[in-house]
């Protein structure tokens, strides 16, 4: 629902202004309701723990929505956060000034967290990399440090409490950081799952694992005897299930597991249930232990999920590379086979056949070397022309000029073969066979999307059009139209061969 509101705001910029306002207001209300519910739940737990903050869920809601939906959601999220915070605190024991100060700090916290993530990770943030997990933790620490200072100052100035400044700040900082890393990843993961839904079998397996986690959590916290269990030990019992979720499912399921465990720990602590709610230990002494348990479990879950996601991505990339390599090898072998067959059809002696075949294969190898050097990301046209002319070119007999153009892999291979045939013919019969001959190769973009290459020979022996087209001439005329959808004009005026090649230009 939140994503649909944002899409309406973002994509309907030319729609009726009233409709845009309604969409923005609806999104703001939705964020405000979610924030209000999370804040009330956090304050209910806070009231059960003698006023000691342990988990501020609402901060994770606002930060997660902003990170997931981007900068277009800033105003609605900030507005919903401010209104919800004021209402929540006015319903408690805070006055309007304290409530407003808290509201501004909470909105600033979400904005700062989302800005830091966008600044260092860009749009489309996802917790499928270890770097992203550490980045979210760092952003939560920075934003909650500033927000906790602001709230503590407002509390000290407007409420005049007896609790030391450092103690108040520490509680709000810890609860804010833990709330952010507990809830924000779940919101981010849900938004990502809406954009790219998991497979049905993955959803079923993930739900089963989450149900098993909840069952094991209940047994270890509530049913098992207190000795020798310590507060952190029950969380360790959940590691196999977290490993299962991380290895088999998207990170959103690990985020859901962290949320379930964190909320269960805080709830049982606040209501005196199980190992975390031991009434013999003062609640103030139990708070650091549960915060350590929550922090340790959530980071463990996120790190495992990120590492397994990176591994799955690496395996998928490897499979893609293998498939691409297989495709390219088949293409190369098919091209080599065609070259061998057509070269043999021209007749002549075995030495002539070997020489012609070697030249064409060397041309293909030179183009392949350039592509390999660039990791098949493209080759500069200037470098390609120079490499093909290299066996015969000198500063006196060749001229190369044109703008810097990057060719795709398909363009590189096709143009390399065509230029090789032109060079070979020029060396045998045309301008490069004469000391006074010279070759000019120029190119430019004619129009917005057409690359034009001009081959011109001058100063060579007089020539005439061949009575019968050989393999080289047919390749020059047919390869570019067949593989690149371009056109070739090859003419034989008496003063030298001219060839005009036009191909669709792909901007890189």
Image: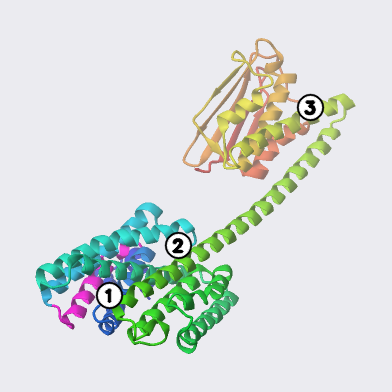
Q: Magenta-highlighted stretch: main secondary structure? A: helix
Marks 2 and 1, how far apart in space? 29 Å
In the image as oriented, which residue stretches furthest toward the bottom?
Answer: 223
The image shows residue 430, relative to residue 188, as above or below, that is above
Q: Disc 2 marks which residue?
A: 126
Q: Disc 1 marks which residue?
A: 53
**Residue drawn where x is 15% and y is 81% of the image:** 93
**Residue 457 shows in this picture:** yes
Q: Nearer the viewer, mark 3 or mark 1?
A: 1
Q: Nearer the viewer, mark 3 or mark 2?
A: 2
Residue 180's spot in the image, x, y percent? 35, 68
Query: Along the polypeptide, which appears first: circle 2 or circle 1?
Result: 1
Query: Along the polypeptide, which appears first: circle 3 or circle 1?
Result: 1
The magenta stretch is: 70-94
Query: Splitting the image into 4 quarters, where does residue 112 fall?
Result: bottom left
In this rendering, position of residue 126 left or right of residue 212: left
**Residue drawn where x is 31% and y is 57% of the image:** 115
């Amino acid at each position: 629902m939140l994503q649909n509101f944002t899409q309406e705001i973002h994509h309907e910029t030319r729609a009726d202004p009233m409709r845009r306002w309604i969409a923005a207001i609806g999104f703001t209300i939705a964020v405000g309701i979610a924030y209000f519910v999370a804040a009330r739940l956090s304050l209910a737990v806070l009231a059960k723990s003698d006023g000691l903050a342990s988990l501020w869920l609402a901060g994770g809601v606002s930060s997660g929505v902003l990170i997931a939906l981007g900068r277009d959601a800033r105003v609605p999220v900030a507005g919903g956060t401010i209104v919800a915070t004021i209402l929540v605190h006015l319903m408690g024991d805070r006055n309007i000034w304290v409530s407003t100060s808290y509201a501004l700090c909470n909105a600033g916290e979400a904005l700062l967290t989302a800005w830091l993530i966008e600044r260092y990770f860009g749009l489309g943030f996802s917790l499928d990399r270890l770097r992203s997990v550490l980045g979210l933790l760092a952003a939560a620490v920075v934003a909650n440090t500033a927000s906790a200072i602001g709230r503590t100052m407002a509390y000290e100035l407007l409420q005049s409490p007896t609790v030391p400044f450092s103690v108040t700040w520490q509680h709000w900082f810890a609860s804010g950081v833990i709330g952010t890393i507990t809830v924000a990843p779940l919101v981010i993961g849900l938004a990502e799952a809406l954009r790219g839904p998991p497979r049905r079998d993955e959803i079923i397996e993930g739900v089963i694992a989450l149900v098993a986690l909840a069952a094991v959590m209940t047994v270890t916290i509530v049913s098992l005897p207190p000795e020798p269990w310590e507060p952190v030990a029950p969380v360790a019992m959940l590691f196999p299930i977290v490993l299962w979720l991380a290895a088999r499912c998207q990170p959103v399921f690990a985020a859901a597991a962290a949320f379930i465990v964190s909320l269960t720990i805080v709830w049982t602590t606040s209501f005196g249930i199980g190992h975390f709610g031991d009434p013999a230990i003062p609640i103030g002494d139990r708070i650091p232990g549960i915060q350590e348990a929550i922090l340790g479990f959530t980071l463990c879950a996120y790190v495992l999920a990120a590492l397994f996601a990176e591994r799955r991505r690496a395996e998928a990339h490897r499979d893609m590379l293998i498939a691409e390599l297989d495709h390219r090898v088949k293409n190369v072998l098919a091209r080599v086979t065609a070259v061998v067959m057509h070269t043999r059809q021209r007749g002549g002696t075995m030495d002539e056949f070997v020489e012609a075949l070697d030249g064409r294969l060397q041309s293909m190898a030179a183009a392949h070397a350039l592509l390999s050097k660039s990791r098949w990301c493209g080759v500069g046209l200037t470098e390609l022309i120079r490499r093909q002319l290299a066996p015969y070119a000198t500063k006196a007999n060749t001229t190369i000029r044109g703008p810097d153009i990057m060719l795709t892999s398909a363009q590189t291979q096709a143009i390399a073969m065509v230029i090789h045939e032109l060079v070979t013919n020029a060396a045998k019969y045309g301008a490069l066979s004469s000391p006074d001959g010279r070759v000019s190769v120029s190119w430019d973009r004619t129009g917005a999307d057409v690359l034009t290459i001009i081959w011109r020979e001058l100063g060579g022996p007089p020539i005439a059009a061949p009575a019968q087209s050989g393999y080289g001439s047919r390749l020059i005329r047919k390869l570019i139209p067949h593989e690149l959808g371009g056109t070739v004009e090859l003419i034989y005026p008496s003063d030298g061969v001219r060839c005009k090649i036009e191909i669709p230009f792909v901007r890189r």
